[in-house]
Image: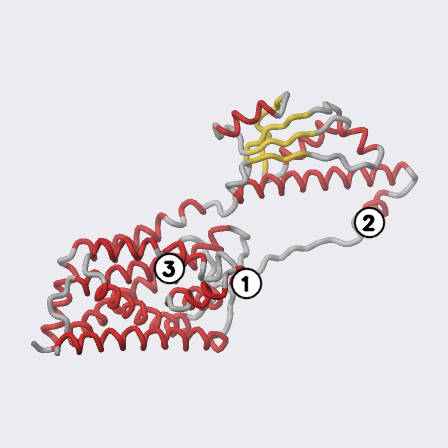
Amino acid sequence: MNWKTTFFTELRRFFSNPAVVFTVFGGVIIYSLLYPLPYDHQLPRELNVAIVDHDDSQQSRAFTRMLDATPQLRVKEMLGQESEASQRLASRDIEGVIVIPQHFYRDLLLGKSPVVSVGGDASFFLVYGTIAEGAVAAGSTLGAQVKVTKAMMHDTPQPLAEKQYTPFSLNMVPVFNPTVGYGDYVVPGVFMLILQQTLLIAAGMLQAGSQENSKRSLFARTTLLFAIYSVMSMYYLGGSLSLNDVNRLAEPLSLAIIMVPFLLATIGAGTLLGSAIKRPEIITLTVLLSSMPLLFSSGFVWPVSALPDWLHWLAQLSPSTATIQATIQLNQMGATLQSQQGFILQLWTLALIYLGVSFTLMKKHKR
């Protein structure tokens, strides 16, 4: 059997396997459309909160209006007691509750700091953090107004009173994530993991179902998968990120230098997986179960410094770990290709090891 016949044989095997075709084309495309969808608004805004006002004073009502005016919160209803909020929180009618204490106005006039209680479901950390952020913003604004007003009552001009309260102005300029949104933060890294996991499944299933285990068939299969996933990589790193308004800073050539060893290493790892596990459904289950550990050990969702050393070094065996770091630094942070030499060397090392072992096993099997 010559090289041309071997390649077309592998091509037929690929397209005659519905599970592989759906994983490669359906999985990659569907994930690219569905995964960013929940993060379309980037950050939660206008969250429904209930107010429990025990003071019922002019200043507490002004504070309630300030809460409603923040972009984070929307005051949906007023409650008489904190206990009334429990059922509404459980039924998702509201996302949080803010309790204004008794003597709120009096404490402000006396220069004391009243304690405003904020409650919410902390299992949704973005929602809870946004509610707390809105409450702090409104509280800071109200506190500033009270202090400036008191200074003006002592014959201090308003401009001077404002400067005394805020001697410096804060100009926050976010870098690398201009929208400060969750989608821009998580989508680029997860896309690389999706590419790896679907490619692992495809390479593993093709290897497990192969009747002819030879170096020639492995070379043809590697070429086929590499060609298909080169197109998928361009889609994920280019068109899909643009479709989701994620900033892109890297040159295509720089990304290609990262993706070539990444794809080769992943195909080699998938081939080894298919050689060790002969049942396609077990391959799929194994790869899927490894997705979350790989995501959290890759160093962009959870900081590397907070990982156990053994887990961090174990994660380096996965091509996605170096690829996620390299592509994010190149494409989202504007790093230079020279600064990624360590990741490039790591990926080529993994590619040579995984493919080298795969071809060695094919040679021994043929003998």
Q: Looking at the image, tell me whether mark 3 or mark 2 is earlier in sequence order.
A: 2
Amino acid type of the residue that numbered disc 2 sits on in the rendered structure: Lys
| Mark 2 surroundings: few (<14), some (14-19) or many (≥20) residues within 10 A | few
* Residue 324 to residue 48: above or below: below
- State the residue position of label 2: 163
- Rounded to the nearest angstrom, the CA distance separating label 2 from label 1 is 40 Å
Label 2 vs label 1, nearer the camera = 1
Front in this rendered view, residue 132 or 168: 132
Residue at the disc numbered 1: 305
Question: Dots 3 and 1: beta carbons under 8 Å?
Answer: no
Foreground of the two, 268 or 155: 268
- Give the residue at x 54% y 52%: 179
Between disc 3 and disc 1, the foreground one is 1
Up/down of 155 relative to 64, above or below:
below
The x, y position of residue 366, in whole percent, is 13, 76
Label 3 or label 1, whichever comes before in sequence order: 3
Element class at badge 1: helix
Real-space Cα separation, disc 3 to disc 1, in angstroms: 21 Å
Can you give x and y, in whole percent of width and height, for residue 77 in the image? 59, 25
Query: Which of the image's four quarters has the C terminus?
Result: bottom left
Amino acid carrying label 1: it is Ser
Q: Is residue 39 left or right of residue 18?
A: right
Cα distance, mark 3 to mark 2? 50 Å
Name the kind of residue labelled 3 in the image. Answer: Leu
Give me the residue at 46% from left, 55% from top: 186
Query: Would you say 285 lies left or right of 344 here?
Result: left
* Residue pictured at 16% horizontal, 76% vertical: 216
Reading the image, the residue beneath label 3 is 193
Residue 237 placement: quadrant: bottom left
Give the colour scheme shown.
secondary structure
